[in-house]
Amino acid sequence: MIITTPDPDDVTGHAAEIYGKDLSGDGMVFGYTRAMAVNPEAHEAFEALVRAVVPSIGLRTYELATLGAARAIGSDHCLLAHGRKSLRAELFDERQLAQLAEDYTTAGLSETDVAVLAFAERLSTDAASMSDADSQRLRDVGFTDRQIVDIALAAAARNFFSRALLAIAVPVDDVPGLSGELVAALRAPGDRARAVSGG
């Protein structure tokens, strides 16, 4: 990454807050945090959007939309970070996360979970051809209009964040607390995406 990011000793305000969370939690500042600290107001707005959508859909559905979008994009940063968040929140176990990264349709998830992942994947790969049928699948498994909108916003927000990190070549850091096997599984979608693009 050629972007010069703020030094931990020089940050204030929201940038100091997000640096502090990384340092207190893991003893390091992650590359994606440093990148976001270049424009902390934008990151603060992103966090406000997340806070606005989670209450209606719940943390599990938010993480499913996030992981589904990150998987479709091939975002190592977000798959690793949200894989760990999902483990810590006991939303999924390591086996489920590894299978979700490989093929979520065979991960033993509910029809509701699969519908969210499929919607997030389609939004992340072919949004221009989506139709009412995509939203109808979410409605058929029980989501309300507000929840359908918020699932779309959650997946779209992950596209914003993940694609920005990829675009400016933010290095992928080791994420503590994940087994080597799970790290390899979570990074596999990114490996596949790079192989297809020749990167």
Image (spheres, rainbow, N blue to C red):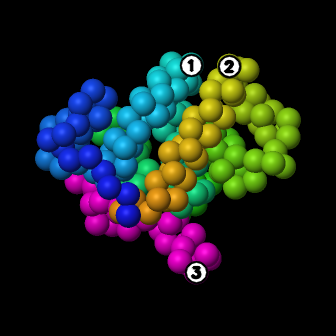
Q: Residue at x 54, y 33 (%)?
A: 61
The amino acid type, in three-letter code, at marker 2 is Arg
Local SS, label 1: helix
Q: Is residue 56 left or right of residue 27?
A: right
The amino acid type, in three-letter code, at marker 3 is Gly
Of callouts 3 and 1, the N-terminal one: 1
Say whether marks 2 and 1 touch (CB < 8 Å): yes
Which residue range is magenta in the image? 172-199
Q: How far separated are the C-alphas under marks 3 and 2?
A: 40 Å
Q: Circle 2 sits on which residue?
A: 146
Q: Is residue 182 left or right of residue 61?
A: left
Q: Residue at x 56, y 44 (%)?
A: 160
Of callouts 2 and 1, the N-terminal one: 1
Say whether marks 3 and 1 touch (CB < 8 Å): no
Local SS, label 3: loop
x and y percentages locating residue 120 in the rendered image: 64, 45
Q: Does the magenta stretch include residue 66?
A: no
Most foreground residue, 41 or 118: 41
Q: In this view, does 9 lie to the left or right of 48?
A: left
Most foreground residue, 32 or 143: 32
Of callouts 3 and 2, the N-terminal one: 2
33 relative to 139, above or below:
below
* Disc number for residue 198: 3
x and y percentages locating residue 147 in the rendered image: 65, 23
Inspect this view and state whether residue 154 appears: yes
Q: How crowded is mark 2: few (under 14 residues within 10 Å), some or many (20 or more)?
A: few
